[in-house]
């Protein structure tokens, strides 16, 4: 806490007296206000995906899912990720299958055919996503 106050002072971000301490919540209404229902509650301010409905099914955006995932610092295990030292293949689980080798080869072939620079092509990460559905609708 002392470090934080010194940092704020150094950056001239806070000219108020800082009085930090721990206060234990003792009433249910205080807990509700802080955790779930208040304007500044944890749940009201926690990043989340917008849920929308298509034909009676709850859906979330792939873009929002990826932004949230990467925003939380998730480091996916790509099937191919060049690190400058190894061949870049991740051979864990389904990544070490003929289907994945074919996908990587096809991706590289398409990039080569499109005239993408070799260094860019080598450094392109290749992976896969698993989409889930409750099986009620085949197409959207």
Image (cartoon, rainbow, N blue to C red):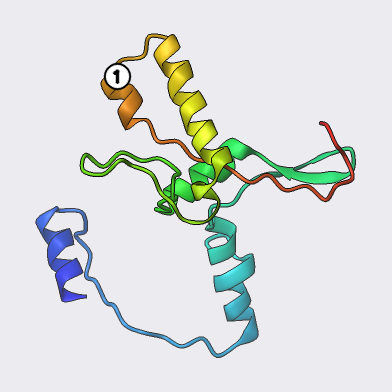
Q: Residues within 10 Å of mark 1 (few under 14, many from 20)?
A: few
In this view, which residue lies farthest toward the front?
Answer: 98
Q: Residue at x 44, y 10 (%)?
A: 113
- The quadrant of the picture occupied by the N terminus is bottom left
Residue 34, position in %: x, y? 54, 72
Residue at 84% from the left image edge and 45% from the top image edge: 57
Report the front residue among 115 and 52. 115
Q: Which residue is mark 1?
A: 118
Q: Please, is residue 116 above or below residue 105 in the view? A: above
Q: Position of residue 44 (x, y in %)?
A: 59, 58
Tell me where residue 14 appears, x and y as whole percent.
21, 58
Q: On the picture, is 126 further left or further right than 57?
A: left
Judged from this view, the residue extending furthest toward the left is: 10
Quarter of the image with the C terminus is top right
**Callout 1: SS:** helix
Residue 41 visible in the displayed image:
no
Q: Is residue 25 above or below residue 65?
A: below
Quarter-wise, where is residue 16 in the image? bottom left
* Residue 23 horizontal/vertical position (percent): 41, 86
Q: Nearer the viewer, residue 49 or 116?
A: 116
Q: Image check: 21 left or right of 85?
A: right
For the point 27% across and 77% down, the residue is: 19
Up the image or down, 110 lies above or below 103; here it is above
């Amino acid at each position: 806490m002392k470090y934080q106050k010194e940092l704020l002072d150094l950056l001239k971000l806070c000219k108020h007296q800082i009085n930090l301490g721990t206060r234990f919540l003792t009433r249910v209404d205080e807990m509700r206000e802080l955790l779930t229902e208040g304007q500044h509650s944890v749940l009201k301010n926690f990043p989340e995906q917008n849920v929308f409905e298509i034909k009676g099914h709850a859906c979330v955006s792939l873009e929002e899912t990826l932004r949230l995932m990467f925003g939380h610092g998730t480091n996916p295990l790509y099937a191919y990720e060049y690190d400058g030292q190894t061949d870049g293949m991740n051979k864990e689980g389904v990544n070490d299958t003929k289907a994945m080798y074919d996908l990587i080869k096809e991706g590289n072939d398409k990039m080569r055919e499109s005239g993408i620079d070799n260094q860019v092509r080598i450094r392109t990460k290749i992976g896969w996503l698993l989409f889930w559905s409750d099986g009620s609708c085949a197409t959207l």
